[in-house]
Amino acid sequence: MSAIFNHWLTQNALVIGSFALVFFLLRAGARNERWQRAWVRLKCDRTGLIALGIICVYLLVGALEMLRVPNGGGPTRSIIDVLTASIAPEKTYSAPLADELLASPLHEKTVGRHLLGTDVLGKDVFVETLKACRTALIIGGLTTAIYIPLGALLGILAGYFRRWVDDVIQYIYSTLASIPEILLLVAILLVLGKGLGTMALALGITGWVGLCRLIRGETMRQSERPYIAAARALGQTHWKIVIHHLLPNVMHLVLISAVLGFSNIVLAEAILSYLGVGAPVGTASWGAMIDSGRTELSRDPFVWWNISAATVALFGLVLALNLLGDALRRAFDPKRG
Amino acid sequence: MLSYLVRRLLYAVPILFGVILITFFLDNVMMTPNEKAGRVLGNKAVGKTREEWIRNRGLDLPMPTQFVRYVKKTVTLDFGTSWQTGREVRKIFLNGAGPSLLITVPGFFAAFTASLALALFQVFVRDSPLDRGLTIATVALMSIPTMVYVIFGQAVIALGLSYFPAYGFSYGGFGMVRFLLLPVAIFIMINLGYNTRLYRAIFLEEIQQDYVRTALAKGLSGTRILTVHVFKNGLIALITLVVAQLPKLVLGSLLIESLFGIPGLGNVLVQAIQNADQPVVMASVILGSVLYITGLILTDICYALADPRIRLS
């Protein structure tokens, strides 16, 4: 079973499948008239469009690292591995474009020149930065896939049924929210073990509270509207009202939260790396690169390229996500701006 | 008001019970008693020493008994002593709160004032290129991880320019101020972007209100409406929001304290997690949730005080 799952074709199918799923979900959303109007407005928003373009570049780089090709019997390689196969590893640190290893008393020459230098293991920092894109996207994507349905559904249920359903859901999220978040994250990760999947699960368990609260409030507002009363008077079942009437009318808030939430997840990964429960060793991640900067910047001569490359890459993605989130909010709700 | 307070406090009881249950569960799944003993005593202590240590702390009792014991201790505010240092948990917290507050209180109020000023300025020049540029700048400030602020702050300002010490803390006097300046500055930077964006949104929301249109129709100038009407009403919404964050200042900033080696509560917590110091971790969780619930109650009271239409019942 796991042999089939770990086969490179299955992995590739999963990657393409999840990209297709997101695409079709957005397409389905776009049938809604409100979404169409928002799209028209977004197309005139220069900041939003630039942000969207930047995110697409990150998605592309991440996808290139996720898709795998066979390697003549050996372990499979990603497309980025294939594209950068000509870049030979060094023994240890070398500065950007230097032809000599760092602090080498024998003035040892490097095998080649590296655009952003190499890290302690001699890996090319530029390639590592590109590869780390996959880690950020996988953690962000999995976490979003866990907490968005959970938060949206529980929020709608609490806001629509009220009474004891609301009491129970409120109790659960008040309890979760009152535990210091970092502590809960670290504890869950220590229980479940390190890994991208468990990290997403931990972030998902702690992350749905805010969305649930937001959707609950909006559902309560929508439930007061005449169209819900009309649907009920026409004898529609609760299930139909929730799926056909309430869900489409709060979905834009879910989209905005998902985009803004994604940026928080990418930032959280850096903190988790520092606390020792980040991405597993051997997985390229911006968090781990930034964390290694703690010791590298106090070396002499100091190694600034590793942490800088990771910071710039992470900053670009988080900034683009935040700007897109804001642009989406403007597009869906032009009055508030 | 009084009946409201009593009810809110009663409502906090099941939440605290849930918090204790979750942390107790996680704590027991995380490590077996034997592993805990290994962490605290070191791997060399085996056999009798270890068994005795486990028995002394009641870790060999059945789970339900342990849980009841734990709830009893929490209710009587008896948090015991730290497994790692043997010091009283209450004392650890009293000592840690000081350094934490020394960073968060000045940092919080400076960030609040600066963000308020920036947000108001943005509202004055709203929809201009300047406003748009500032919005992007505030988002950019938010998009840099805390770690990066601290690491570059330490490397460039402390080590490179040697203006301030990069690490450590001293009690009292001018020395303490020198140790605090950089952490406080970073605390402000971290909060500035997020706050400004939020405050600006609150003021812009206020501008949409009907009373602004009425004031315009009455012939008041735009500046007067902004400085008198919008500012006052926005400030109410803002302060109720800010009040919820106040109790949590006691807990300090986890990353800043541990990266700068400041002996505040955030640092205490990081070390307790790393050393599997159960009494300290549990007490931190209880303290954290009590402070969180206090923040919520304070918010409700603030709403009622600011808006006479809201009655707490």
Image: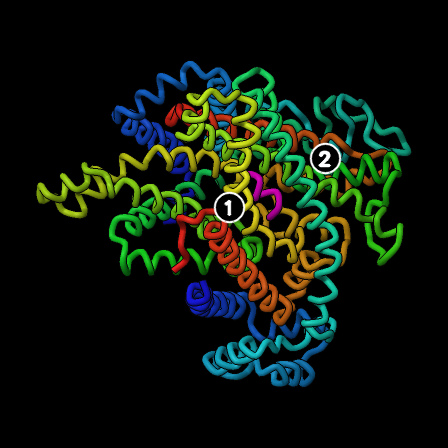
Residue at the (59%, 37%) spot, across then down: B195
Is A270 one of the magenta-colored residues?
A: yes
In the image, residue B282 sits, relative to residue B151, either above or below, namely below
Foreground: B266 or A60?
B266
**Left/right of residue A260 with respect to residue A39 in the rendered view:** right
Q: Which residue is mark 2?
A: A119
Mark number, residue B45: none
Foreground: B260 or A141?
B260
Residue at the (85%, 56%) spot, across then down: B170
Report helix, strand or loop for mark 2.
loop
Quadrant of the image containing the C terminus of chain B: bottom left
Which residues lie in the magenta part? Answer: A266-272
- Which one is earlier in the sequence, the residue at label 1 or at label 2? 2
Could you tell me residue B265's position as x and y percent?
68, 59
Dot 1 and dot 2 within a common chain? yes
Could you tell me residue A268's position as x and y percent?
57, 44
**Which amino acid type corresponds to the residue marked 2 in the rendered image?**
Asp
Quarter-of-image position of residue B59: bottom right
